[in-house]
Image (cartoon, helix red, strand yellow):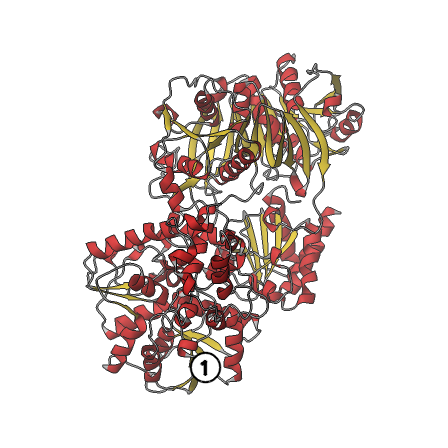
């Protein structure tokens, strides 16, 4: 097993200037996993400081529980970066080869197939069959790239997001194109899981495509893709989330919502990678408020306090050590208690984890989970969207 | 033209596949099948009795080194028998089993003759044996001719025979002979290892009876357990069942559980959500039971039953029990 | 201890629509993702574990063209001391006997105490390579091993049998052991690790010294084609009892099940 100090030849403490840590515990206090996992950010920093070689950190399997929501780093009064310490420990474990098997499969799949779901590259555009979707593979050119993302492309439930967006773009006359089966995983989750080499391989492919096709902007379905393009790719073009585009369209009156509508009580679940990490809170709400019939209510834990659904940081492929109810289940129960009909999401991981939670809490029929794009398209097309 | 069939046996009984091999062999050479029994001292007679009527002749060799399966001894013995035979066999057939994977290629190396393994069908064209094999994960089929050599070897995938073995009426003659084996084989059987109780690794099971949310409650899992017991299968499940603590984590098939590729995957009340489907879609045979005709599991299942698992599963359990007697 | 492991570079055919090449006998590999054969991953991991435990050196062998070197790099990345690739155009579309002859040629005059390989490969699945190599080397082989322990000049293995049973066998070294999946947990090999491995040399051998004249090699692939199967689930109709009988027939067909 490689050593922690193998990263750049310095100890973790030196690399992340952890001597400044107050041990105040605000990081752990805000960590969405600390409710149910042994993961303790404050302890990680402590151990990397006081232990002679800090190598004991490598034995802490709970490092895989981290969702990379970055609440810890955002709360640190000394502006330290515990989230990156987690990632650094993961990176060393990756080099040592001992990582959760499910994560291994996702990583190897990303390299082999360009997506973490073990699906063939050839099937990446299967979701688009029979509907109008612009693609460079059909010579649709545009300065605006709609980056669909692996999960909306391949997952049967999340596919609803992609189909809804394609429909909205069609109806609103939005100029865009997609990469079709040339699109490969953005690498966000792989990077957060510590696989820097894999992230580099994946991002090189995307960056080459972006440059070659001369895009002037990228709009992403998933906040994870959006976030990594902004934070990690070093692009010099603007990257936005689809809710921002929809909010602009709504404001311009370009979304032809249906007139009649039944009253629906909706609570918006802020995705960590959209809200906490990129401060995008209002755009999704503005879209929802524009939909006729939607009564928007707020969770007690909303905006920067939103309860992480445990989908990020590679967690879609890591079971985690946590005991008891998952955060997504807590979210669903809270929503039902609030009398909410629909939890609206804007991220494919939130969508899937919340849908899962509806089933596991036995709440079918009591609440529904919809992506914002699906809610918009429901209103436009007036048809009942079901899984 | 004769065909030899290498019989597989354990604890005094012939393994099921032996009967299939005898039928395959008989079909190839119009009945001139020799059943070859390699056994420990004193074990042969009872085994030969089980062969009676299913082969023209039984060639019986007993040797202390063959009291338990020993691939080296078996390959040496067969090579000696084949080369020394008055009428050498045109084809030596075996099962593509744990044993067959051990002795057959070794024998092919010793005899330096053409051989194929894991054939699903065999036929004789002129004096050439042609084998059909399933390759590339079952996606393609390959036909191979084993060149006009004097002797060839083929092992057969158990269960691939389409027709039931015909009941023969011939009286099987028994020829006992011996072989001279080196005293030091370099390989020695030590002990049997029984399947560990309690430690379940679903990824090693040949058959899985898997339950999803459709099982509705923890108590109802015995419907699946009964079927599993009848089949000699292992119970597995999808994620929600584990989340609800109805089964332990080690039983979970899914992206965050285990990926499985059993011979048979029986999905009871599993919708086939992607995170589950992706972890079992490579199963050789998937039979899905679900009330919902639109359940995604039917997209990847080989066989689908739209119905109530609480009626179908018990019916299947009863049918299996009746068949096994 | 001198240890060797043989690995193969094979196509991943999951979800792929396979096409047969114009010759009607081989697979069109273009466009398919390739990877190390799954069984060989376990063999490689086992080889590295044994090397770590008893000491010695590990040589990784691969019979394949240049594109197949990715799998050898993986071997170097996890700790193989040397990597050898043998290839010759004559080996295109080779049958198991020809491959085994190539494996024998690659070993040359080296004397290995222990040679590991996967029990079979995911493309053709003959499972013959290891035992045929052993015969060519005049040493013992044992197939389908899911547990092994080196004890001096012997190795104690468990062969995996049907129905969850096992057979403990003691084998004198030198020997070829063919490895079943599940024997260990192959480690993850990071991209960084593979990149570092790209800097290490690979010995490349050609077909000189490979004797392809064995009688056993007289196998002729007559055709490769799609098997007669239907698409999607075939729905079984009828009462639960009727459906159960049909399932029973299907289970027998599945092979080795009943």
Q: How many marks?
A: 1
Q: Which structural element holds mark 1? A: loop
Front-most of A194 and B25? A194
Mark yes or no: residue B75 visible.
Answer: yes
Residue A305 or residue C179, whichever sits in front = A305
Q: Position of residue A319 (x, y in %)?
A: 53, 60
Task: Determine whether C124 is above or below A233 in the image.
Answer: above
Give the answer, above or below, for where B76 lies relative to A194: above
On the rendered structure, is B216 left or right of C89?
right
Apparent side of residue A246 relative to residue B26 in the rendered image (left or right): left
- Position of residue A186 relative to residue B109, above or below, is below
**Residue shown at 70%/44% (left/top)?**
B195
What residue is shown with label 1?
A: A299
- Across and down, in percent, residue A95 comes to 44, 47
Q: Position of residue A11 (x, y in %)?
A: 42, 53
**Could you tell me which chain the residue with mark 1 belongs to?**
A
Q: Position of residue B177 (x, y in %)?
A: 74, 16
Q: Quadrant of residue B57?
A: top right
Can residue A193 be seen from the camera position used here?
Answer: no
């Amino acid at each position: 097993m490689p050593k922690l100090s193998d990263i750049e030849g310095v100890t973790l403490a030196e690399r992340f200037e952890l001597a400044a840590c107050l041990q105040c515990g605000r990081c752990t206090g805000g960590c969405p996993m600390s409710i149910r996992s042994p993961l303790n950010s404050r302890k990680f920093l402590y151990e990397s400081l006081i232990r002679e070689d800090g190598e004991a950190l490598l034995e802490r399997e709970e490092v895989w529980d981290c969702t990379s929501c970055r609440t810890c780093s955002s709360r640190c009064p000394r502006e330290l970066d515990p989230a990156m310490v987690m990632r650094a420990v993961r990176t060393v474990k990756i080099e040592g080869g001992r990582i959760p098997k499910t994560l291994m499969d996702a990583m190897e799949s990303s390299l082999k197939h360009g997506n973490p779901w073990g699906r063939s590259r050839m099937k990446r555009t299967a979701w688009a069959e029979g509907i109008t979707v612009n693609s460079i593979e059909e010579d649709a050119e545009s300065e605006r790239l709609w980056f669909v993302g692996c999960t909306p492309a391949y997952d049967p439930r999340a596919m609803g997001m992609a189909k809804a967006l394609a429909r909205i773009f069609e109806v609103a006359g939005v100029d865009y194109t997609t990469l079709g089966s040339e699109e490969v995983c953005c690498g966000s989750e792989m990077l957060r899981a510590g696989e820097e080499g894999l992230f580099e391989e994946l991002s090189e492919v995307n960056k080459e495509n972006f440059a070659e096709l001369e895009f002037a902007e990228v709009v992403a379905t998933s906040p994870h893709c959006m976030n990594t393009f902004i934070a990690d790719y070093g692009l010099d073009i603007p990257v936005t989330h689809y809710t921002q585009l929809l909010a602009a369209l709504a404001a311009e009156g370009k979304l032809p919502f249906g007139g009649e509508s039944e009253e629906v009580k909706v609570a918006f679940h802020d995705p960590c990678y959209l809200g906490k990490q990129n401060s995008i809170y209002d755009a999704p709400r503005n879209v929802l408020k524009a939909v006729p019939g939607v009564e928007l209510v707020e969770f007690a834990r909303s905006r920067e306090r939103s309860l992480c659904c445990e989908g990020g940081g590679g967690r879609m492929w890591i079971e985690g050590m946590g005991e008891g109810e998952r955060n997504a289940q807590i979210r669903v129960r809270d929503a039902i208690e609030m009398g909410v009909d629909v939890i609206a999401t804007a991220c494919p991981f939130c969508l899937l984890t919340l849908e899962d939670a509806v089933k596991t809490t036995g709440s079918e029929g009591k609440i529904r989970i919809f992506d914002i794009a699906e809610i918009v398209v429901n209103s436009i097309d007036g048809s009942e969207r079901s899984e | 033209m004769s065909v030899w069939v290498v019989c597989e046996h354990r604890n005094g009984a012939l393994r099921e596949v032996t009967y299939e091999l005898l039928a395959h062999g008989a079909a190839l050479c119009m009945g001139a099948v020799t059943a070859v029994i390699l056994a420990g001292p004193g074990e042969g007679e009872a085994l030969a009795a089980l062969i009676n009527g299913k082969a023209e002749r039984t060639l019986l060799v007993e040797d202390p080194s063959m009291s338990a399966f020993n691939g080296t001894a078996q390959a040496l013995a067969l090579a000696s028998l084949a080369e020394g035979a008055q009428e050498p066999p045109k084809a030596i057939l075996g099962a593509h089993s744990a044993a067959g994977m051990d002795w057959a290629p070794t024998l092919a190396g010793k005899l330096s003759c053409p051989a194929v393994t894991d054939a699903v069908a065999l036929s004789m064209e002129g004096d050439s044996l042609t084998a059909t094999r399933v390759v590339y994960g079952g996606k393609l089929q390959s036909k191979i001719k084993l060149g006009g050599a004097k002797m060839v070897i083929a092992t057969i995938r158990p269960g691939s025979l389409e027709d039931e073995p015909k009941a023969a009426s011939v009286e099987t003659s028994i020829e006992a002979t011996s072989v001279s084996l080196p005293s030091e084989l370099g390989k020695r059987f030590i002990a049997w290892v029984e399947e560990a109780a309690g430690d379940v690794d679903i990824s090693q099971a040949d058959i899985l009876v898997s339950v999803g949310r459709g099982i509705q409650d923890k108590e109802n899992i015995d419907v699946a357990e009964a079927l599993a017991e009848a089949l000699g299968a292992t119970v597995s499940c999808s994620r929600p069942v584990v989340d609800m603590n109805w089964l332990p984590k080690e039983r979970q098939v899914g992206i965050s559980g285990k990926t499985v590729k059993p011979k048979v995957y029986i999905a009871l009340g599993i919708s086939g959500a992607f995170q589950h489907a992706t972890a079992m879609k490579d199963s050789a045979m998937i039979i899905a039971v679900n009330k919902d005709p639109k359940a995604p599991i039917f997209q990847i299942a080989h066989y689908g039953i739209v119905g109530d698992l609480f009626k179908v599963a018990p019916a299947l359990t009863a049918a299996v029990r009746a068949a096994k007697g | 201890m001198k240890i060797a492991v043989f690995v193969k570079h094979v196509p991943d055919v999951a979800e792929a629509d396979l096409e047969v090449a114009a010759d009607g006998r081989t697979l069109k590999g273009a466009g398919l993702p390739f990877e190390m054969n799954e069984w060989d991953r376990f063999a490689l991991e086992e080889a590295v574990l044994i090397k770590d435990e008893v000491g010695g050196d590990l040589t990784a062998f691969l019979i394949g063209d240049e594109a197949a070197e990715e799998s050898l790099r993986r071997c170097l990345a996890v700790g193989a001391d040397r990597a050898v690739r043998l290839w010759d155009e004559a080996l295109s579309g080779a049958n198991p006997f020809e491959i085994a002859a190539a494996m024998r040629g690659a070993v040359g005059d080296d004397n290995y105490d222990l040679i590991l390989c996967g029990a079979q490969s995911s493309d053709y699945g003959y499972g013959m390579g290891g035992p045929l190599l052993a015969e060519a080397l005049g040493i013992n082989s044992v197939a389908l091993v899911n547990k092994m322990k080196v004890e001096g000049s012997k190795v104690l293995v468990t062969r995996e049998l049907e129905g969850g049973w096992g057979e403990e066998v003691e084998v004198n070294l030198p020997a070829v052991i063919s490895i079943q999946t599940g024997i260990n947990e192959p480690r993850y090999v990071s991209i960084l690790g593979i990149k570092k491995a790209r800097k290490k040399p690979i010995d490349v051998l050609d077909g000189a010294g490979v004797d392809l004249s064995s009688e056993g090699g007289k196998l002729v692939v007559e055709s490769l084609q799609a098997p007669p199967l239907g698409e999607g689930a075939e729905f079984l109709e009828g009462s639960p009892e009727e459906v159960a009988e049909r399932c029973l027939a299907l289970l027998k067909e599945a092979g080795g099940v009943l």
